[in-house]
Amino acid sequence: MITLARFREIAHLGKYTWEGKHIKRVQQALDAYNKGPGAERLRTLDTRCDEWWQRHPHSSRAQLSDRAWYKQVAMDRLSQDIEAEKFRTETYPKPTRGFKARRAKEESFYPKYRNHHPGTIETVKVKNNWNQNLFECSEWLVGPPPQRKGKLNSEGTREAMEMAFDAVRLARMRLPKGAFNNRGGLPKKILKEEQYPKWQNLFIDMSVGNLIESGLNIVANQRGIPPEEDFVLQHAILAKVTAAVGGAVCSKIASLTLGLLTAIAEPGTRVAQVWHNSDHEFLLVGYKDSPWIVADPWPHNSYVTPLRYNQFGYDNIERHNRLTIHKKCREPFGVIFRDPVVEKSLESTRRQMGAPTEKDKETLHSYGQETNLESAFPGYQEWLAATGEQWGPNSFG
């Protein structure tokens, strides 16, 4: 958790001023938590931050004075630390509806579907009640995404790498069982978390199918689009079930990570989920003048790296879907699930499949991908987002 001194430094606050009633309450709660961490104090700090965000909606740099901008930057950093702390701390109740973004709670969001035609770049536009786009998303397209040529040392590159770094860690926090198709070399404590990866992978597939067939009663904010026709909702269902299981193969991990990025990435961020011909899926993040930045929680040692330094290179990407974020979602993909309905469906699928057998102990692949980093770049050590030991909510203490 960020210290009060560091928070005030980022916010450019003067030595003898609190800079307003609501940010004063945030600082007091932060100071109290750092002096004596606990679930109740973390909850209080979270509430104080929510109060501040409701009075100061997230705005672009051009809309704010320097003083207001630095406050927002500091509050962004603190809010990210709070979300990470919630998942690290067992005593804090985990959100029942996925990742909580920083916005007024009364807003509701729903996707609006557009029909797609093979080979064209149609978009799914997700809107809130004020008709403002949250993001645009394509379905699968042939070939790699358009190239991005950016400078390694630019501000946009660092911001893109920070968003990718946060997304990798948040995904890893939700995956205590590790990658089901990259088991070779995983620590024994991770392997013990799941004895039947093959069964669990099939369980995810069947659960997603059953939830899609369940229709719109699984979500609180969809408006009349059948799940079997809604690419965004299918992504959201896959991410939801993957997090519920706590482990998955690379394609499912990529969908989970993409959902997290819709909740934490800055407006203007572009994300591509790519399929590489080595049978691997991962994400690329682009922001401002950055090149494509890799966000891939799947390998044991996950580096956030410009694509040109990645083991899975641009030229061998055979298909992708891409997403442009216009506004942060309150939940992954802007979808609010009816959790009791989802849980009942998962239980039904477990009964339908029956208990796992010895055959289900088989690994899906004999991969042992230690790292995604092909070659070093300046300062690469700083961008090791997760090691082979770091899976699960308490792995980043």
Image (spheres, rainbow, N blue to C red):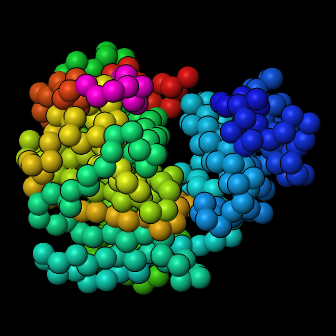
Q: Position of residue 206 (x, y in %)?
A: 26, 55
Q: What percent of the width, then of the height, locates residue 377?
A: 28, 28
Foreground: 394 or 379?
379
Residue 85's x, y, as percent?
Answer: 61, 34
Residue drawn at the location 54% of the way across and 73% of the way down = 109
Residue 361 seen: no
* Image coordinates for residue 25, horizontal then vertical, percent: 86, 45
Provide the residue span drawn in magenta. Answer: 376-387
User: Which residue: 21% across, 47% down?
Assistant: 281
Location of residue 204 with respect to 300 vertically, above or below: below
- Report the side of 213 relative to 158 (left or right): left
**Which image quarter holds the C terminus?**
top right
Residue pictured at 70% horizontal, 54% vertical: 66
Q: Is residue 379 magenta?
A: yes
Does residue 217 appear left or right of residue 285 in this picture? right
Q: Quadrant of residue 175?
A: top left
Residue at 33%, 22% (x, y): give it.
Answer: 388
Q: Quadrant of the N terminus?
A: top right
**Which quadrant would residue 236 be assigned to in this image?**
bottom left
Q: Is residue 320 above or below residue 4?
A: below
Give whichever of 238, 313 is nearer the camera.
313
Quick check: 369 left or right of 46? left
